[in-house]
Image: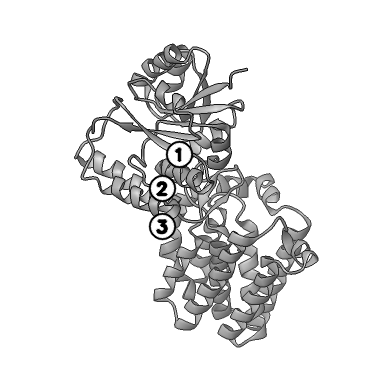
């Protein structure tokens, strides 16, 4: 039997072009299913696609890569053809190439800026995989089942194509580029065009760094280590300690296994979680020179990590508590504010590097503000939260509490 084919089209606010694109795809691939990933369109994109004969997966407004990743799960096993919503031209030669990943290279340049984003994307692909890409940003791609397994879930935003090429090449798969006479709505050298290419550049850079999978199953860039930039305005002692804690968290992000919680890590022996459990108190003790201070910092680091199970949750908790504590926490507030929109929109993740570091910052703020009985009460409260997190899900508790649930969902897609 011939291998099944699904054509996947990511679309946002493409009411004018999607119907024509879907009809052309049906004509060129009559046996294929046309699947449209509607990335939170605010016009009639979904209705126009359905009227043209496509199956539409309606999604929150997240980004191109996220839309492709979530909609791909709805496709049956087999070959996958990716297509932009405003494309004109035939894509059959991509399937005829019989490569694991075949990428369309436009025969003629259309629009564009000065080539900075594309040149940067080529350099990133070459540096991460050794593959020399002519069209690293092309959205027209044919993937075998093996390539689907290697490349999905895709990286977020406009970084999805760059990371897709890297993942396929590093996985030892056959990657080719096929020159085709295609046309699409090109961006120009105006403000909107430069803004689009600026986003492409940023997304491509983020997509080439370390990625982790979030609760929705999306692969997102780990940017929590950027929290350490706040240390430029903090005392040297606190800045070095927070940087060390972020490093321990990053090691856990990149090397951790399936173990969860203190019981899971200590029961498994030498894990990255055990390394954090020993390293964070040691760093905190060196910075505070106080057993109670080190305990407070360590428990704070763990508490914010326990909350970091949904987009924006840990950052909201940090910003709320830092407003009360002030002191050392204020140096890190600007970085948290900058990261919040990306975290809420599921473009990036804090990971343990970010949540542990920001939690430690709250701990240092508490050490500076609390003494005696107040510090003991804070330690007891955080210890209780840690025990509760071991026994049950704090996320479920938040979601069942109306006020907390409403605050938790604020700003999230």
Picture disc at residue 131: 2
In x, y percent, where is residue 257? Answer: 69, 58
> Considering the image in quadrants, where does the N terminus appear?
top right
| Residue density around tag 2, few if under 14, some if 14–19, many if 20 or more, within 10 Å | some
In this rendering, position of residue 29 left or right of residue 385 = left
Residue at 44% x, 28% y: name it: 97
Is residue 168 among the parts visible in the rendering?
yes
Q: Secondary structure at mark 3?
A: helix
Choose between 46 and 124: the one closer to the eye. 124
Instruction: Read off the residue under disc 1.
Output: 175
Choose between 357 and 87: the one closer to the eye. 87
Instruction: Read off the residue under disc 3.
Output: 338
In this rendering, position of residue 168 left or right of residue 73 = left
Choose between 270 and 77: the one closer to the eye. 77
Cβ atoms at labels 2 and 1 below 8 Å apart: yes
Cβ atoms at labels 1 and 3 below 8 Å apart: no
Label 2 or label 3, whichever lies nearer to me, is 2
Is residue 362 among the parts visible in the rendering?
no
Label 1 or label 3, whichever lies nearer to me, is 1
In this rendering, position of residue 378 left or right of residue 184 = right
Residue at 65% x, 66% y: name it: 302
Cβ atoms at labels 2 and 3 below 8 Å apart: no
In x, y percent, where is residue 244? Answer: 54, 75
In x, y percent, where is residue 398? Answer: 66, 50
Cα distance between the residues tagged 2 and 3: 33 Å
Choose between 6 and 198: the one closer to the eye. 6
| Residue density around tag 3, few if under 14, some if 14–19, many if 20 or more, within 10 Å | few
In this rendering, position of residue 1 left or right of residue 12 = right
147 versus 351 height, above or below: above
Q: Secondary structure at mark 2?
A: loop
């Amino acid at each position: 039997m011939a291998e099944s084919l699904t054509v996947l089209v990511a679309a946002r606010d493409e009411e004018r072009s999607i119907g024509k694109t879907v009809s052309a795809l049906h004509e060129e691939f009559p046996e294929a299913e046309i699947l449209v990933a509607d990335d939170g369109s605010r016009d009639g994109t979904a209705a126009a696609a359905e009227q043209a004969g496509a199956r539409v997966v309606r999604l929150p407004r997240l980004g191109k890569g996220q839309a492709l990743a979530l909609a791909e799960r709805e496709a049956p096993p087999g070959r996958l053809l990716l297509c932009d919503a405003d494309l004109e031209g035939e894509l059959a030669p991509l399937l005829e190439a019989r490569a694991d990943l075949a990428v369309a290279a436009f025969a003629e340049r259309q629009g564009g800026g000065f080539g900075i984003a594309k040149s940067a994307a080529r350099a990133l692909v070459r540096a991460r995989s050794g593959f020399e890409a002519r069209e690293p940003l092309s959205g027209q791609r044919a993937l075998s089942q093996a390539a689907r397994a290697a490349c999905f879930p895709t990286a977020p935003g406009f970084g999805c194509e760059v990371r897709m090429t890297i993942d396929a090449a590093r996985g030892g798969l056959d990657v080719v580029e096929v020159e085709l006479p295609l046309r699409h709505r090109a961006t120009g050298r105006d403000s909107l065009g430069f803004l689009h290419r600026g986003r492409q550049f940023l997304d491509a850079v983020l997509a080439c760094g370390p990625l982790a999978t979030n609760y929705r199953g999306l692969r997102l860039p780990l940017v929590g280590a950027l929290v350490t930039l706040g240390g430029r305005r903090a005392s040297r002692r606190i800045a070095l300690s927070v940087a060390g804690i972020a490093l321990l968290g990053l090691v856990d992000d990149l090397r951790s296994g399936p173990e969860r919680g203190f019981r899971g890590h200590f029961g498994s022996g030498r894990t990255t979680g055990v390394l954090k459990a020993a390293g964070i108190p040691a760093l905190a003790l060196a910075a505070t020179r106080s057993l109670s201070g080190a305990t407070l910092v360590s428990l704070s680091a763990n508490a914010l990590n326990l909350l970091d199970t949904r987009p924006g949750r840990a950052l909201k908790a940090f910003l709320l508590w830092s407003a009360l504590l002030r002191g050392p926490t204020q140096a890190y507030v600007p970085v948290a504010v900058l990261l919040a929109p990306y975290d809420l929109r599921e473009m990036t993740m804090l990971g343990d590097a970010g949540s542990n570091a920001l939690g430690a910052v709250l701990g240092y703020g508490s050490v500076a503000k609390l003494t005696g009985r107040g510090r003991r009460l804070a330690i007891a409260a955080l210890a209780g939260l840690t025990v509760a997190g071991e026994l049950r899900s704090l996320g479920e508790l938040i979601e069942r509490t109306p006020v907390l649930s409403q605050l938790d969902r604020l700003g999230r897609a």
